[in-house]
Image (tube, rainbow, N blue to C red):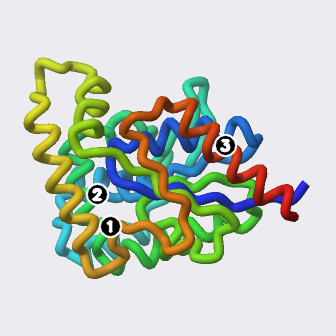
């Protein structure tokens, strides 16, 4: 059977991670969370005191940084120079910093090569924000997963490990700011590829979204 390269882009909280993992599992494909790579750079930069605008410092950091995906007992994990940072990168602070860091050309150039190497063998689902527009413009199947800002904020609030530590209003405010940063930046802004299948998940369950995607993928496979 033909192996496909599938991209799923969209804003934070749209359900990309859950949907991408589920789709990859149903197809027997690899799942690659590219946002985790940018979060990893942001996390290491923060802990080493490298500012987001310091291109020279970011370049030196990247030269000595080895980011790797490994399969652990709880699923895919991200390591930075051997340290598991999977949980540490899932904070609002790192999310905002990752958005800023991802706009730096020096960071994008390095991670672009990493991502394209990961996609060379296809049979993979790549989740991110510019997978179908910049990283893999010739991907076999492209999706853009969206949802209303309020719905996305509600999902993030429900995922919070300690709801008392953060308010829904703060999450929604940060999400709107992140959306502005991602969609208005000059380099690789967040947008749907012209040939992407756009799915609004506001009123859909995860299973419904996955089934829609599977139906489209099967149609592509049937056409050869």
**Residue 186 in the image, given as x and y percentages of width and height:** 27, 81
Q: Which mark is residue 102?
A: 1
Confirm or deny contact between disc 2 and disc 1 (CB under 8 A): yes
**Residue 67 in the image, given as x and y percentages of width and height:** 49, 55
Quarter of the image for residue 1 reads bottom right
Q: Nearer the viewer, residue 34 or 136?
A: 136
Q: Nearer the viewer, residue 141 or 98?
A: 141
**Residue 87 in the image, given as x and y percentages of width and height:** 37, 34
Q: Nearer the viewer, residue 166 or 169?
A: 169
**Residue 167 in the image, given as x and y percentages of width and height:** 10, 28
Could you tell me which residue is drawn at 54 percent across and 57 percent down? 143
Could you tell me which residue is drawn at 62 percent across and 47 percent down? 213
Q: Which mark is residue 24?
A: 3
Give the answer, above or below, for where 123 lies relative to 89: below
Q: Left or right: 202 with respect to 76? A: left
Q: Which mark is residue 35?
A: none
Give the answer, above or below, for where 114 lies relative to 71: below
Q: Left or right: 178 with respect to 72? A: left
Give the answer, above or below, for where 180 lies relative to 24: below
Query: Dot 2: within a 10 Å radius of its alpha carbon, few (fewer than 14), some, or many (20 or more) residues?
Result: many
* Residue bearing mark 2: 98
Quarter of the image for residue 98 reads bottom left
Could you tell me which residue is drawn at 31 percent across and 31 percent down? 155
Q: Left or right: 147 with respect to 114? A: left
């Amino acid at each position: 059977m033909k192996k496909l390269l599938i991209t799923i882009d969209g804003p934070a909280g749209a359900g990309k991670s859950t949907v991408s993992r589920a789709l990859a599992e149903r197809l027997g494909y690899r799942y690659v969370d590219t946002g985790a790579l940018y979060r990893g750079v942001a996390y290491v930069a923060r802990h080493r005191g490298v500012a987001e605008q310091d291109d020279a410092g970011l370049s030196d950091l990247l030269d000595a940084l080895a980011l790797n995906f490994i399969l652990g007992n709880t699923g895919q994990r991200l390591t930075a120079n051997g340290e598991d940072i999977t949980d540490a990168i899932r904070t609002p602070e790192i999310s905002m910093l990752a958005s800023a860091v991802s706009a730096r050309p020096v960071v994008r150039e390095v991670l672009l090569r990493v991502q394209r190497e990961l996609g060379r063998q296809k049979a993979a689902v790549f989740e991110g924000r510019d997978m179908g527009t910049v990283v893999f413009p010739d991907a076999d199947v492209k999706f853009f997963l969206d949802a209303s800002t309020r719905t996305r904020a509600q999902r993030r609030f429900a995922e919070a490990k300690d709801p008392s530590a953060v308010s829904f209003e703060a999450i929604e405010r940060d999400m709107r700011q992140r959306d502005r940063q991602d969609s208005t930046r000059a380099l690789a802004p967040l947008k749907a590829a012209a040939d992407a299948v756009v799915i609004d998940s506001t009123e859909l369950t995860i299973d419904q979204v996955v089934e829609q995607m599977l139906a489209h993928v099967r149609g592509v496979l049937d056409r050869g």
